[in-house]
Amino acid sequence: MDNKKEEAIEQYADTLYKLAFLRLKNREDAEDVVQEVFYKYIRANMQFESTEHEKAWLIQVTLNQCRSLWRAGWNKKVDILPEKEACTAPEMEQAYLVKERDRKLLREILKLPGKYREVIHLFYYENYSVKEIAMLTGRKENTVTSQLSRGRALLKKALGEAYDYEEI
Amino acid sequence: MIMRKFREAYREALDNSIRYTACCHKIQDEAEHRDRLRRQRRKKAVSAAAGFFVLLICGFTTVKAADYICSRISVTGFGFKSSTVTAENLQEQFAAGEEAGFLEDWTEVTEKGIKADRVIIEEIEERTYTSYEAFKKQETFPLVIPEIPEGQMEEIHIWVTGENEALTFWKKADNKEVILDIWNFGNSKVHAGSRNYPYGVTNERSFTTKDGRNYLVVDSKAHEAAGTRIHTAIVVGAYEIYGDYIGYTEEQVYEMLESMDLSLYE
């Protein structure tokens, strides 16, 4: 494997894993998906126009791989964060509160229907525009916009008005 | 109050919780690759062979206990459907569920271009076992397994979902498979579901066992190369039991149905 591909794997592994985990809600499946995507990437000998094109290809293949694995009607055990930890020392309180806040936010994200979760992640974490998300997921722009707004509405309902969602 | 940017909060929460580094050697390793494919094939095989079950449980409805009607299963062109409510009530429940954000988008059966019902979205824990003994040690879900003709190469998987809400049993013996999907609706007020097979079903009939259990039986329309696929459905108490028998003759399937004592579900 050439250095360029190794660098790309190093660079995108975490991105693809997060996306796969959010779609599948299972670490083992997410790891299998990411490794399989890179296996294809190494063998595909694709010529990419730019790093953005390369990243978009990897994301598309990851989403397709996740869809093919998904078992209709069944959600896997979610193991995003360890169980609640005891908070004993006062200096740990701040870190504990931050963890609790993170846990709550991610729990609500994972409760969203899969397609909303996907677009929320691509928009807020990967900074993709609606147009780009539409291309990546093969959906219409209107559909993506509506899924984003329905996802946001569900999050607002669950998390209250604690966040500014930078709506478009 | 200063509102925190959701974008920043989400990034921080995810980065604090998940970090992943890929191992290039593991990715390229052919043995690892084959293992990954095997795991995926197994998951897909169970999913495809068993058809899929789309389900709506409305635990939040205002239906009174007195209104509860026992499950009814009937045959559709694509498999089975079951419900405890009228179609009119069901529409209302779907609307309520959608409003509450519980429901996933439509699931499509691409082979025929039909659209199935909606899929339940909840945080449901799933536990997997690869032997009956391991399952019995940990679980209390009642599982009655038919007497399946033995094979040289056997593989078994049992999945239990949530608080004993559903169980899937899958056994492969050589190239033949038995899949049982057992749903416990004892804790839900109303539900509606359908179990669909990608190629549709035909030859609806019933089979009554010696102890008087009446099964609905259909054949899959899958092409001949896929082998015979016989599907059965029965309601016992609060349980709906669906069976998929792949590669077995009708006679063998009936023998397996006779071998099950379903009184455990009453």
Image (tube, coloured by chain):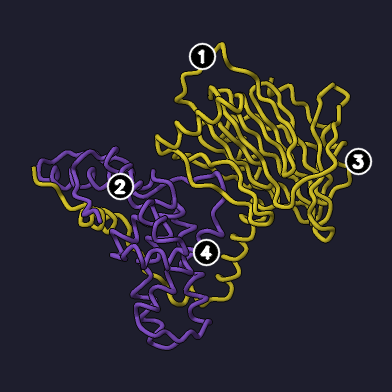
Chain colours: A purple, B yellow
Q: Chain of mark 2?
A: A
Q: Secondary structure at mark 3?
A: helix
Q: CA distance from mark 1 to mark 4?
A: 43 Å
Asked if badges 3 and 4 are on one and the same chain, I answer no
User: What amino acid is at disc 3?
Assistant: Glu
User: What amino acid is at disc 4?
Assistant: Gln
Q: Secondary structure at mark 1?
A: loop
Q: CA distance from mark 1 to mark 2?
A: 34 Å
Mark 2 / mark 4, whichever is N-terminal:
4
| Labelled disc at residue A152 | 2
Q: Chain of mark 4?
A: A
Q: Secondary structure at mark 2?
A: helix
User: What amino acid is at disc 1?
Assistant: Lys
Q: Are marks 2 and 4 in contact (CB under 8 Å)?
A: no
In the depicted structure, whether residue A70 falls above or below residue B137: below
Q: CA distance from mark 1 to mark 3?
A: 43 Å
Residue B174 visible in the picture: no
Residue under label 1:
B64
Residue under the point 29% across and 61% down? A125
| Labelled disc at residue B251 | 3
Instruction: Give the image location of residue A159, x and y in percent.
Output: 25, 40
Crowdedness of circle 4 by 10 Å Cα count: few (<14), some, many (20+)? some
**In front of the other: label 1 or label 3?**
1
